[in-house]
Amino acid sequence: MNNVINIRAYHETYQEHVIALILAIQRAEFNIPITREDQPDLCSIPNFYQVNNGNFFVALYGERVVGTIGLLDIGLGYGALRKMFVKQEYRGKVCKTASLLLNQLLQWSNDRGFKKIYLGTTPQFLAAHRFYEKNGFQEIVMEELPSNFPIMKVDKKFYRLALVGPNGDVQG
């Protein structure tokens, strides 16, 4: 496999591919009983994620969507990392798809002055927990989330990352 993965900002031409990828991972791989209708953000990515300083990125192998990551601007210099999914055969150290997606999101966040990134995830995503921790995210309890953090009903585990500003100082 040629491991050239390109990260691009979301465009509506990717919508059905994004939805199919995320639902397949949630339902088939992790047995999470969730539907398209349970995730209205997926049907309106530009209006949900790509507003204020938020964005949504896709990982492409050729023209095929193999990964996603979203940044929701929740105000006060805080962002919510959402919808990070990578197709199974594009995970790991060979393709580095998750790292490429996260690095794009963090660069975007730093360039726009975000101070902290928060995320919620499910207990089943053990490899994701290790990935986030390896990348500097600290596990927190739900009470440490900002009041405007959008908690999904499947979220039971939470993380926070304090970003480093241009002069090397930890933000907020």
Image (cartoon, rainbow, N blue to C red):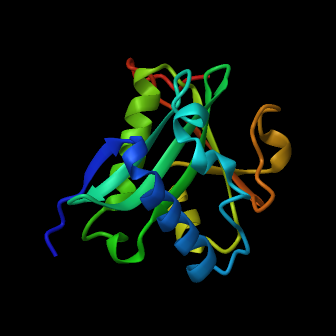
- Which image quarter is the N terminus in? bottom left
Image location of residue 2, percent across then percent down: 13, 70
Q: Residue furthest right?
A: 143
**Identity of the residue drawn at 80% across and 40% down:** 144
Image location of residue 165, percent across then percent down: 44, 22
Q: Nearer the viewer, residue 28 or 91?
A: 28
Image location of residue 90, percent across then percent down: 33, 70
- Position of residue 16 relative to residue 137, above or below, is below
**Identity of the residue drawn at 41% across and 70% down:** 87
- Position of residue 140 relative to residue 51, above or below, is below
Q: Is residue 140 visible?
A: yes
What is the count of numbered marks?
A: 0
Relative side of 167 to 163, left or right: left
Q: Nearer the viewer, residue 144 or 59?
A: 59
Q: Residue furthest left?
A: 2
Relative side of 32 to 125, left or right: right
Image location of residue 129, percent across then percent down: 58, 64
Q: Is residue 135 visible?
A: no
Q: Quadrant of residue 39?
A: bottom right
Q: Quadrant of residue 110?
A: top left
- Which image quarter is the C terminus in? top right
Relative side of 154 to 110, left or right: right
- Position of residue 116 relative to residue 16, above or below, is above
Relative side of 66 to 53, left or right: left
